[in-house]
Image (tube, coloured by chain):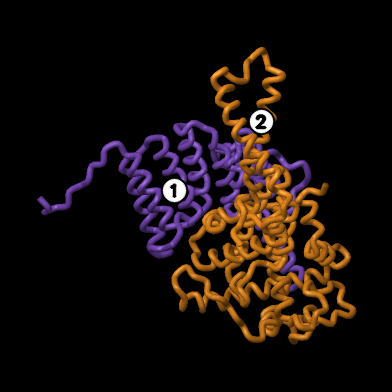
Chain colours: A purple, B orange
Amino acid sequence: VTPDAALAADGQARAAARLRGAAEALSVLEHRGPADQHAACLFAMSLLGAQAAQADWPRAGLPAAPSPGEPAGVRIPVGDRAVVLLAHVAMVLHTAAMPSAERPWHWDRLARFFAARLPASDPDLLRLRVRLLGARVEAGDTSREVFSELMAAVEFHRAGHGADAYLTSVAQANLSRAFRQRPTLVLSREPGTG
Amino acid sequence: MPSIRQELETTRTARWYRHAHGARRAGAWAERVRDYAALRDVLAGHAAVAGTEAGRGEQPPIQLAGLLKLVAQRAHYAGAEPVYRRYRDKQQSQPILRWAGPDPVIRPSAAFLAEARIAAFWPYREGAAEVADAFDMTRVEWAAAYLRALAAWAADNRPLAACHPVAPPPCVPEDMAVIAGAGPRWAAGPTAADHAARLSALAGEVVRTVLRDSSITPLGAYNTVRDEVRSLLSPPPESLADQVLRAVAELTDRMTCPVDGDAALEPGQARRLHTMLGGLSALLAQQARAQPDGYPRTADGYLREA
Protein backbone atom coordinates (compact mmCIF):
# COMPACT_ATOMS: atom_id res chain seq x y z
CA VAL A 1 0.00 0.00 0.00
CA THR A 2 1.66 3.23 -1.10
CA PRO A 3 0.60 6.59 0.34
CA ASP A 4 -0.67 7.66 -3.11
CA ALA A 5 -2.76 4.51 -3.53
CA ALA A 6 -4.13 4.91 0.00
CA LEU A 7 -4.96 8.57 -0.71
CA ALA A 8 -6.77 7.74 -3.97
CA ALA A 9 -8.87 5.04 -2.31
CA ASP A 10 -9.50 7.39 0.58
CA GLY A 11 -10.85 10.10 -1.77
CA GLN A 12 -13.66 7.89 -3.00
CA ALA A 13 -14.43 6.52 0.46
CA ARG A 14 -14.60 10.06 1.84
CA ALA A 15 -16.97 11.22 -0.91
CA ALA A 16 -19.24 8.25 -0.23
CA ALA A 17 -19.13 8.85 3.53
CA ARG A 18 -20.03 12.48 2.99
CA LEU A 19 -23.10 11.38 1.05
CA ARG A 20 -23.99 9.01 3.90
CA GLY A 21 -23.86 11.85 6.42
CA ALA A 22 -25.89 14.11 4.14
CA ALA A 23 -28.50 11.38 3.57
CA GLU A 24 -29.01 10.95 7.31
CA ALA A 25 -29.42 14.69 7.81
CA LEU A 26 -31.84 14.94 4.88
CA SER A 27 -33.92 12.16 6.44
CA VAL A 28 -34.51 14.41 9.44
CA LEU A 29 -36.34 16.83 7.12
CA GLU A 30 -38.98 14.22 6.33
CA HIS A 31 -40.94 15.65 9.25
CA ARG A 32 -41.00 19.21 7.88
CA GLY A 33 -43.71 20.67 5.65
CA PRO A 34 -44.14 19.97 1.92
CA ALA A 35 -42.07 22.99 0.80
CA ASP A 36 -39.05 21.90 2.85
CA GLN A 37 -39.51 18.28 1.80
CA HIS A 38 -39.44 19.38 -1.82
CA ALA A 39 -36.36 21.55 -1.28
CA ALA A 40 -34.65 18.69 0.58
CA CYS A 41 -35.40 16.30 -2.29
CA LEU A 42 -33.86 18.74 -4.76
CA PHE A 43 -30.85 19.10 -2.46
CA ALA A 44 -30.45 15.32 -2.50
CA MET A 45 -30.71 15.31 -6.29
CA SER A 46 -28.07 18.04 -6.53
CA LEU A 47 -25.73 15.89 -4.43
CA LEU A 48 -26.42 12.90 -6.65
CA GLY A 49 -25.81 15.05 -9.72
CA ALA A 50 -22.52 16.36 -8.37
CA GLN A 51 -21.11 13.25 -6.67
CA ALA A 52 -22.58 10.14 -8.26
CA ALA A 53 -21.86 8.76 -11.69
CA GLN A 54 -24.29 10.02 -14.29
CA ALA A 55 -27.66 8.30 -14.26
CA ASP A 56 -31.12 8.77 -15.66
CA TRP A 57 -32.82 9.62 -12.37
CA PRO A 58 -36.24 10.43 -13.87
CA ARG A 59 -36.22 6.84 -15.11
CA ALA A 60 -35.86 5.88 -11.44
CA GLY A 61 -38.98 7.90 -10.58
CA LEU A 62 -37.00 10.80 -9.13
CA PRO A 63 -36.65 14.40 -10.32
CA ALA A 64 -33.77 15.06 -12.68
CA ALA A 65 -30.45 15.81 -11.02
CA PRO A 66 -29.15 19.27 -11.95
CA SER A 67 -25.92 19.10 -13.90
CA PRO A 68 -22.99 20.12 -11.70
CA GLY A 69 -21.68 23.61 -12.30
CA GLU A 70 -18.07 22.56 -12.01
CA PRO A 71 -16.21 19.54 -13.35
CA ALA A 72 -16.80 16.63 -11.02
CA GLY A 73 -13.89 15.23 -9.06
CA VAL A 74 -14.52 11.81 -7.59
CA ARG A 75 -17.61 10.12 -9.04
CA ILE A 76 -19.23 7.45 -6.92
CA PRO A 77 -20.67 4.49 -8.84
CA VAL A 78 -24.48 4.39 -8.94
CA GLY A 79 -24.45 0.93 -7.32
CA ASP A 80 -22.47 2.21 -4.30
CA ARG A 81 -24.36 1.92 -1.03
CA ALA A 82 -24.07 5.68 -0.35
CA VAL A 83 -25.80 6.46 -3.66
CA VAL A 84 -28.52 3.85 -3.10
CA LEU A 85 -29.29 5.20 0.37
CA LEU A 86 -29.31 8.82 -0.77
CA ALA A 87 -31.65 7.99 -3.64
CA HIS A 88 -33.84 6.16 -1.12
CA VAL A 89 -34.02 9.27 1.07
CA ALA A 90 -34.67 11.45 -1.99
CA MET A 91 -37.63 9.23 -2.86
CA VAL A 92 -39.01 9.42 0.70
CA LEU A 93 -38.91 13.21 0.41
CA HIS A 94 -40.20 13.23 -3.16
CA THR A 95 -43.27 11.13 -2.36
CA ALA A 96 -43.97 12.52 1.13
CA ALA A 97 -46.63 14.98 -0.01
CA MET A 98 -48.07 12.79 -2.77
CA PRO A 99 -51.42 11.06 -2.50
CA SER A 100 -50.98 7.44 -1.36
CA ALA A 101 -52.23 6.12 -4.68
CA GLU A 102 -49.35 7.76 -6.58
CA ARG A 103 -46.50 6.56 -4.41
CA PRO A 104 -46.21 2.89 -5.47
CA TRP A 105 -45.44 3.86 -9.07
CA HIS A 106 -42.43 5.93 -7.94
CA TRP A 107 -41.12 3.31 -5.53
CA ASP A 108 -41.52 0.64 -8.18
CA ARG A 109 -39.42 2.68 -10.61
CA LEU A 110 -36.68 3.16 -8.02
CA ALA A 111 -36.65 -0.51 -7.02
CA ARG A 112 -36.44 -1.57 -10.68
CA PHE A 113 -33.69 0.98 -11.34
CA PHE A 114 -31.48 -0.48 -8.63
CA ALA A 115 -32.52 -4.08 -9.31
CA ALA A 116 -30.72 -3.69 -12.63
CA ARG A 117 -27.56 -2.53 -10.83
CA LEU A 118 -27.37 -4.55 -7.61
CA PRO A 119 -27.27 -8.25 -6.78
CA ALA A 120 -30.73 -9.66 -6.04
CA SER A 121 -29.68 -10.42 -2.44
CA ASP A 122 -28.46 -6.89 -1.69
CA PRO A 123 -30.01 -5.80 1.65
CA ASP A 124 -30.52 -2.21 0.46
CA LEU A 125 -32.39 -3.47 -2.59
CA LEU A 126 -34.59 -5.48 -0.25
CA ARG A 127 -35.26 -2.34 1.79
CA LEU A 128 -36.39 -0.60 -1.38
CA ARG A 129 -38.68 -3.52 -2.20
CA VAL A 130 -40.12 -3.41 1.32
CA ARG A 131 -40.69 0.32 0.97
CA LEU A 132 -42.52 -0.33 -2.28
CA LEU A 133 -44.67 -2.96 -0.56
CA GLY A 134 -45.45 -0.48 2.24
CA ALA A 135 -46.52 2.09 -0.34
CA ARG A 136 -48.74 -0.50 -2.01
CA VAL A 137 -50.36 -1.41 1.32
CA GLU A 138 -50.98 2.28 2.09
CA ALA A 139 -52.58 2.61 -1.33
CA GLY A 140 -54.95 -0.21 -0.42
CA ASP A 141 -53.19 -3.07 -2.18
CA THR A 142 -53.34 -6.08 0.15
CA SER A 143 -53.01 -8.70 -2.54
CA ARG A 144 -51.56 -12.17 -1.98
CA GLU A 145 -48.38 -11.09 -3.77
CA VAL A 146 -47.79 -8.26 -1.28
CA PHE A 147 -48.28 -10.59 1.69
CA SER A 148 -45.99 -13.26 0.34
CA GLU A 149 -43.20 -10.70 -0.25
CA LEU A 150 -43.66 -9.22 3.23
CA MET A 151 -43.52 -12.69 4.77
CA ALA A 152 -40.41 -13.46 2.73
CA ALA A 153 -38.82 -10.30 4.12
CA VAL A 154 -39.53 -11.47 7.68
CA GLU A 155 -37.93 -14.82 6.93
CA PHE A 156 -34.96 -13.18 5.19
CA HIS A 157 -34.17 -11.04 8.23
CA ARG A 158 -34.88 -13.82 10.72
CA ALA A 159 -32.45 -16.09 8.88
CA GLY A 160 -29.83 -13.41 8.33
CA HIS A 161 -29.93 -11.46 11.60
CA GLY A 162 -31.89 -13.53 14.10
CA ALA A 163 -35.39 -13.42 15.58
CA ASP A 164 -34.62 -10.49 17.91
CA ALA A 165 -32.84 -8.30 15.36
CA TYR A 166 -34.08 -4.80 14.64
CA LEU A 167 -34.87 -5.41 10.96
CA THR A 168 -36.73 -8.63 11.81
CA SER A 169 -38.99 -6.69 14.15
CA VAL A 170 -39.48 -3.95 11.53
CA ALA A 171 -40.40 -6.58 8.92
CA GLN A 172 -42.88 -8.15 11.35
CA ALA A 173 -44.40 -4.73 12.04
CA ASN A 174 -44.77 -4.14 8.28
CA LEU A 175 -46.52 -7.48 7.93
CA SER A 176 -48.91 -6.82 10.81
CA ARG A 177 -49.67 -3.35 9.40
CA ALA A 178 -50.61 -5.01 6.12
CA PHE A 179 -52.87 -7.46 7.97
CA ARG A 180 -54.61 -4.57 9.72
CA GLN A 181 -55.18 -2.89 6.35
CA ARG A 182 -56.71 -6.01 4.84
CA PRO A 183 -60.48 -5.67 4.70
CA THR A 184 -61.32 -9.35 5.15
CA LEU A 185 -58.82 -11.93 6.16
CA VAL A 186 -59.26 -15.39 4.65
CA LEU A 187 -57.11 -17.92 6.44
CA SER A 188 -56.25 -20.98 4.44
CA ARG A 189 -57.23 -24.13 6.30
CA GLU A 190 -54.53 -26.68 6.92
CA PRO A 191 -55.23 -30.10 5.43
CA GLY A 192 -56.82 -32.55 7.84
CA THR A 193 -57.97 -29.99 10.40
CA GLY A 194 -61.67 -30.32 9.67
CA MET B 1 -23.91 35.41 16.07
CA PRO B 2 -22.11 32.48 14.39
CA SER B 3 -24.18 29.58 13.11
CA ILE B 4 -23.79 26.11 14.57
CA ARG B 5 -21.85 25.06 11.48
CA GLN B 6 -19.49 28.02 11.85
CA GLU B 7 -18.96 27.11 15.50
CA LEU B 8 -18.30 23.49 14.55
CA GLU B 9 -15.55 24.71 12.23
CA THR B 10 -13.73 26.31 15.14
CA THR B 11 -13.51 23.37 17.55
CA ARG B 12 -10.06 22.16 18.50
CA THR B 13 -10.47 19.03 16.38
CA ALA B 14 -11.76 20.97 13.37
CA ARG B 15 -8.67 23.20 13.52
CA TRP B 16 -6.40 20.19 13.89
CA TYR B 17 -8.05 18.45 10.93
CA ARG B 18 -7.72 21.51 8.69
CA HIS B 19 -4.07 21.90 9.67
CA ALA B 20 -3.31 18.19 9.13
CA HIS B 21 -5.15 18.09 5.83
CA GLY B 22 -3.53 21.29 4.55
CA ALA B 23 -1.92 21.29 1.12
CA ARG B 24 1.58 21.92 2.44
CA ARG B 25 1.32 18.80 4.57
CA ALA B 26 -0.24 16.61 1.85
CA GLY B 27 2.62 14.10 1.94
CA ALA B 28 2.46 13.78 5.71
CA TRP B 29 -1.32 13.40 5.57
CA ALA B 30 -0.97 10.67 2.92
CA GLU B 31 1.27 8.75 5.34
CA ARG B 32 -1.41 8.99 7.99
CA VAL B 33 -4.11 7.90 5.54
CA ARG B 34 -1.93 4.88 4.77
CA ASP B 35 -1.78 4.10 8.50
CA TYR B 36 -5.57 4.41 8.86
CA ALA B 37 -6.15 2.15 5.84
CA ALA B 38 -3.78 -0.44 7.31
CA LEU B 39 -5.62 -0.22 10.64
CA ARG B 40 -8.95 -0.89 8.91
CA ASP B 41 -7.45 -3.99 7.28
CA VAL B 42 -5.97 -5.25 10.54
CA LEU B 43 -9.26 -4.73 12.40
CA ALA B 44 -11.37 -6.22 9.62
CA GLY B 45 -9.27 -9.38 9.68
CA HIS B 46 -9.60 -9.63 13.44
CA ALA B 47 -13.33 -8.87 13.41
CA ALA B 48 -13.97 -11.61 10.88
CA VAL B 49 -12.41 -14.15 13.26
CA ALA B 50 -13.93 -12.72 16.46
CA GLY B 51 -17.35 -12.25 14.87
CA THR B 52 -17.85 -15.97 14.42
CA GLU B 53 -17.45 -16.47 18.18
CA ALA B 54 -19.84 -13.69 19.24
CA GLY B 55 -23.61 -13.61 18.96
CA ARG B 56 -25.11 -13.19 15.50
CA GLY B 57 -25.11 -9.55 14.50
CA GLU B 58 -23.07 -8.44 17.50
CA GLN B 59 -19.67 -6.83 17.11
CA PRO B 60 -17.60 -7.67 20.20
CA PRO B 61 -14.96 -5.21 21.44
CA ILE B 62 -11.56 -5.63 19.80
CA GLN B 63 -8.39 -5.34 21.82
CA LEU B 64 -5.12 -5.96 20.04
CA ALA B 65 -1.71 -5.96 21.65
CA GLY B 66 0.99 -4.21 19.63
CA LEU B 67 -1.49 -2.36 17.45
CA LEU B 68 1.02 0.02 15.86
CA LYS B 69 3.37 -2.84 15.07
CA LEU B 70 0.56 -4.71 13.34
CA VAL B 71 -0.32 -1.58 11.39
CA ALA B 72 3.29 -1.06 10.34
CA GLN B 73 3.48 -4.66 9.14
CA ARG B 74 0.23 -4.38 7.27
CA ALA B 75 1.35 -1.15 5.58
CA HIS B 76 4.64 -2.88 4.65
CA TYR B 77 6.95 -0.54 6.53
CA ALA B 78 10.41 -1.90 7.15
CA GLY B 79 9.83 -1.41 10.87
CA ALA B 80 7.33 0.06 13.31
CA GLU B 81 9.39 3.18 14.09
CA PRO B 82 7.99 5.47 11.34
CA VAL B 83 4.47 4.77 12.61
CA TYR B 84 5.38 5.21 16.31
CA ARG B 85 7.10 8.48 15.50
CA ARG B 86 3.90 9.99 14.19
CA TYR B 87 1.83 9.22 17.29
CA ARG B 88 4.20 9.44 20.23
CA ASP B 89 4.05 12.38 22.64
CA LYS B 90 7.38 13.90 21.56
CA GLN B 91 6.56 15.52 18.24
CA GLN B 92 9.71 17.41 17.30
CA SER B 93 10.04 17.97 13.56
CA GLN B 94 6.74 16.29 12.78
CA PRO B 95 4.86 18.17 10.03
CA ILE B 96 1.54 17.18 11.61
CA LEU B 97 1.26 17.28 15.39
CA ARG B 98 -0.71 14.41 16.84
CA TRP B 99 -4.33 15.20 17.76
CA ALA B 100 -3.86 13.95 21.32
CA GLY B 101 -1.26 16.63 22.10
CA PRO B 102 1.98 16.28 24.08
CA ASP B 103 0.54 14.51 27.14
CA PRO B 104 2.88 11.52 27.73
CA VAL B 105 0.11 9.65 29.54
CA ILE B 106 -1.65 9.15 26.18
CA ARG B 107 0.04 6.16 24.61
CA PRO B 108 0.89 6.23 20.89
CA SER B 109 -1.64 3.49 20.11
CA ALA B 110 -4.44 5.44 21.83
CA ALA B 111 -3.44 8.65 20.03
CA PHE B 112 -3.42 6.78 16.72
CA LEU B 113 -6.83 5.19 17.33
CA ALA B 114 -8.32 8.58 18.22
CA GLU B 115 -7.07 10.10 14.97
CA ALA B 116 -8.19 7.13 12.89
CA ARG B 117 -11.71 7.50 14.29
CA ILE B 118 -11.76 11.25 13.68
CA ALA B 119 -10.51 10.88 10.11
CA ALA B 120 -13.07 8.18 9.32
CA PHE B 121 -15.96 10.12 10.84
CA TRP B 122 -15.07 13.52 9.43
CA PRO B 123 -16.81 13.23 6.03
CA TYR B 124 -20.02 11.95 7.70
CA ARG B 125 -19.89 14.99 9.97
CA GLU B 126 -19.27 17.34 7.02
CA GLY B 127 -22.14 15.86 5.01
CA ALA B 128 -24.58 16.18 7.90
CA ALA B 129 -23.41 19.71 8.77
CA GLU B 130 -23.80 20.90 5.18
CA VAL B 131 -27.45 19.82 5.10
CA ALA B 132 -28.26 20.96 8.63
CA ASP B 133 -26.86 24.41 7.88
CA ALA B 134 -28.57 24.71 4.48
CA PHE B 135 -31.95 23.98 6.06
CA ASP B 136 -31.42 26.11 9.16
CA MET B 137 -32.09 23.18 11.46
CA THR B 138 -33.19 23.61 15.05
CA ARG B 139 -30.89 22.29 17.75
CA VAL B 140 -33.01 19.16 18.12
CA GLU B 141 -32.79 18.57 14.36
CA TRP B 142 -29.04 19.23 14.43
CA ALA B 143 -28.60 16.63 17.15
CA ALA B 144 -30.74 14.15 15.22
CA ALA B 145 -28.79 14.72 12.01
CA TYR B 146 -25.44 14.45 13.81
CA LEU B 147 -26.32 11.35 15.80
CA ARG B 148 -27.77 9.61 12.76
CA ALA B 149 -24.58 10.40 10.82
CA LEU B 150 -22.62 9.01 13.78
CA ALA B 151 -24.70 5.82 13.69
CA ALA B 152 -24.02 5.52 9.95
CA TRP B 153 -20.30 5.88 10.67
CA ALA B 154 -20.45 3.17 13.34
CA ALA B 155 -22.41 0.86 11.01
CA ASP B 156 -19.92 1.36 8.17
CA ASN B 157 -16.86 1.11 10.46
CA ARG B 158 -17.91 -1.49 13.01
CA PRO B 159 -14.44 -2.87 13.83
CA LEU B 160 -13.01 0.64 14.23
CA ALA B 161 -15.89 1.66 16.51
CA ALA B 162 -15.50 -1.59 18.46
CA CYS B 163 -11.77 -1.17 19.02
CA HIS B 164 -11.03 -0.92 22.75
CA PRO B 165 -12.13 1.40 24.30
CA VAL B 166 -15.47 1.24 22.46
CA ALA B 167 -16.38 4.86 21.90
CA PRO B 168 -17.45 7.46 19.35
CA PRO B 169 -14.73 9.56 17.71
CA PRO B 170 -13.22 11.91 20.30
CA CYS B 171 -14.48 15.02 18.48
CA VAL B 172 -18.03 14.19 19.61
CA PRO B 173 -17.89 15.87 23.07
CA GLU B 174 -16.70 19.16 21.52
CA ASP B 175 -19.38 18.99 18.84
CA MET B 176 -22.08 18.20 21.37
CA ALA B 177 -20.95 21.20 23.39
CA VAL B 178 -21.55 23.36 20.30
CA ILE B 179 -24.94 21.80 19.57
CA ALA B 180 -26.06 22.20 23.19
CA GLY B 181 -24.00 25.32 23.91
CA ALA B 182 -26.32 28.14 22.97
CA GLY B 183 -29.32 26.12 23.98
CA PRO B 184 -31.79 27.17 26.61
CA ARG B 185 -30.15 27.93 29.92
CA TRP B 186 -32.42 27.00 32.75
CA ALA B 187 -32.07 28.96 35.94
CA ALA B 188 -32.72 25.98 38.19
CA GLY B 189 -31.98 23.11 35.81
CA PRO B 190 -28.83 21.57 34.41
CA THR B 191 -26.41 23.86 32.60
CA ALA B 192 -25.58 23.72 28.90
CA ALA B 193 -22.32 21.96 29.81
CA ASP B 194 -24.30 19.25 31.59
CA HIS B 195 -26.52 18.90 28.54
CA ALA B 196 -23.44 18.54 26.32
CA ALA B 197 -21.99 15.87 28.62
CA ARG B 198 -25.26 13.97 28.57
CA LEU B 199 -25.52 14.26 24.77
CA SER B 200 -22.00 12.84 24.49
CA ALA B 201 -23.02 9.91 26.68
CA LEU B 202 -26.05 9.37 24.44
CA ALA B 203 -23.75 9.43 21.40
CA GLY B 204 -21.80 6.59 23.04
CA GLU B 205 -25.06 4.73 23.53
CA VAL B 206 -25.90 5.17 19.83
CA VAL B 207 -22.56 3.62 18.85
CA ARG B 208 -22.97 0.70 21.26
CA THR B 209 -26.50 0.09 19.95
CA VAL B 210 -25.13 -0.19 16.41
CA LEU B 211 -22.46 -2.64 17.59
CA ARG B 212 -25.02 -4.83 19.36
CA ASP B 213 -27.19 -5.36 16.28
CA SER B 214 -25.77 -5.38 12.76
CA SER B 215 -29.25 -4.97 11.28
CA ILE B 216 -30.10 -1.72 13.02
CA THR B 217 -30.43 1.39 10.86
CA PRO B 218 -29.14 4.84 11.85
CA LEU B 219 -32.75 5.85 12.46
CA GLY B 220 -33.31 2.81 14.69
CA ALA B 221 -30.16 3.59 16.68
CA TYR B 222 -31.10 7.26 17.04
CA ASN B 223 -34.61 6.35 18.15
CA THR B 224 -33.17 4.66 21.24
CA VAL B 225 -32.07 8.09 22.55
CA ARG B 226 -34.46 10.41 20.70
CA ASP B 227 -36.78 11.26 23.58
CA GLU B 228 -33.95 12.27 25.88
CA VAL B 229 -32.24 14.31 23.15
CA ARG B 230 -35.47 16.19 22.59
CA SER B 231 -36.01 16.84 26.26
CA LEU B 232 -32.43 18.11 26.62
CA LEU B 233 -32.61 20.53 23.70
CA SER B 234 -36.24 21.60 23.55
CA PRO B 235 -37.13 24.90 25.18
CA PRO B 236 -38.55 24.40 28.68
CA PRO B 237 -42.34 24.42 28.86
CA GLU B 238 -43.78 27.82 29.65
CA SER B 239 -44.73 28.17 33.29
CA LEU B 240 -48.41 28.54 34.17
CA ALA B 241 -47.81 32.06 35.43
CA ASP B 242 -46.15 33.05 32.14
CA GLN B 243 -49.02 31.55 30.16
CA VAL B 244 -51.52 33.60 32.21
CA LEU B 245 -49.43 36.76 31.80
CA ARG B 246 -49.28 36.25 28.04
CA ALA B 247 -53.01 35.52 27.80
CA VAL B 248 -53.92 38.56 29.93
CA ALA B 249 -51.72 40.84 27.82
CA GLU B 250 -53.23 39.50 24.60
CA LEU B 251 -56.78 39.81 25.91
CA THR B 252 -56.17 43.36 27.09
CA ASP B 253 -54.81 44.28 23.64
CA ARG B 254 -57.76 42.79 21.86
CA MET B 255 -60.24 44.53 24.20
CA THR B 256 -58.62 47.92 23.86
CA CYS B 257 -57.93 47.63 20.13
CA PRO B 258 -60.59 45.34 18.64
CA VAL B 259 -59.82 44.08 15.12
CA ASP B 260 -62.63 44.73 12.62
CA GLY B 261 -64.98 45.57 15.50
CA ASP B 262 -64.88 41.98 16.86
CA ALA B 263 -65.64 41.82 20.56
CA ALA B 264 -62.89 39.84 22.28
CA LEU B 265 -65.31 38.55 24.92
CA GLU B 266 -68.97 37.72 25.27
CA PRO B 267 -70.65 39.42 28.28
CA GLY B 268 -71.03 36.04 30.02
CA GLN B 269 -67.32 35.28 29.56
CA ALA B 270 -66.46 38.73 30.85
CA ARG B 271 -68.54 38.15 34.03
CA ARG B 272 -66.92 34.76 34.72
CA LEU B 273 -63.43 36.15 34.16
CA HIS B 274 -64.16 39.16 36.35
CA THR B 275 -65.22 36.87 39.21
CA MET B 276 -62.22 34.54 38.79
CA LEU B 277 -59.70 37.33 38.41
CA GLY B 278 -61.09 39.04 41.50
CA GLY B 279 -60.34 35.90 43.55
CA LEU B 280 -56.96 35.45 41.86
CA SER B 281 -56.12 39.10 42.49
CA ALA B 282 -56.62 38.66 46.24
CA LEU B 283 -54.42 35.54 46.25
CA LEU B 284 -51.73 37.33 44.27
CA ALA B 285 -51.72 40.27 46.64
CA GLN B 286 -51.25 37.84 49.54
CA GLN B 287 -48.43 36.07 47.73
CA ALA B 288 -46.68 39.28 46.76
CA ARG B 289 -46.78 40.54 50.35
CA ALA B 290 -45.50 37.22 51.73
CA GLN B 291 -42.48 36.86 49.38
CA PRO B 292 -39.83 39.10 50.92
CA ASP B 293 -39.93 37.61 54.41
CA GLY B 294 -37.14 35.12 53.71
CA TYR B 295 -38.96 32.13 55.16
CA PRO B 296 -38.06 28.89 53.38
CA ARG B 297 -40.64 27.77 50.87
CA THR B 298 -41.19 24.64 48.86
CA ALA B 299 -41.08 24.78 45.07
CA ASP B 300 -44.81 25.49 44.82
CA GLY B 301 -44.48 28.53 47.06
CA TYR B 302 -45.95 27.12 50.27
CA LEU B 303 -44.08 27.63 53.51
CA ARG B 304 -42.02 24.63 54.49
CA GLU B 305 -42.47 23.24 57.99
CA ALA B 306 -39.45 23.59 60.23
* Amino acid beneath label 1: Val
Q: Residue at x 58, y 73 (%)?
A: B44
| Residue A20 appears anywhere in the view | no
Query: Which of B297/A148 is in front?
Result: B297
The residue wearing badge 2 is B248
Q: Residue at x 20, y 47 (%)?
A: A188
The Cα–Cα distance between marks 1 and 2, rounded to whole angstroms, is 53 Å
> Residue A42's quadrant in the figure?
top right
At which x and y percent is residue B158? 58, 68
Circle 1 — which element?
A: helix
Using the image, determine if residue B299 lies above or below residue A34.
below
Counting every numbered tag in the picture gives 2
Q: Nearer the viewer, mark 1 or mark 2?
A: 2
Using the image, determine if residue B288 lies above or below residue B276.
below
At which x and y percent is residue B14? 79, 61
The residue wearing badge 1 is A130
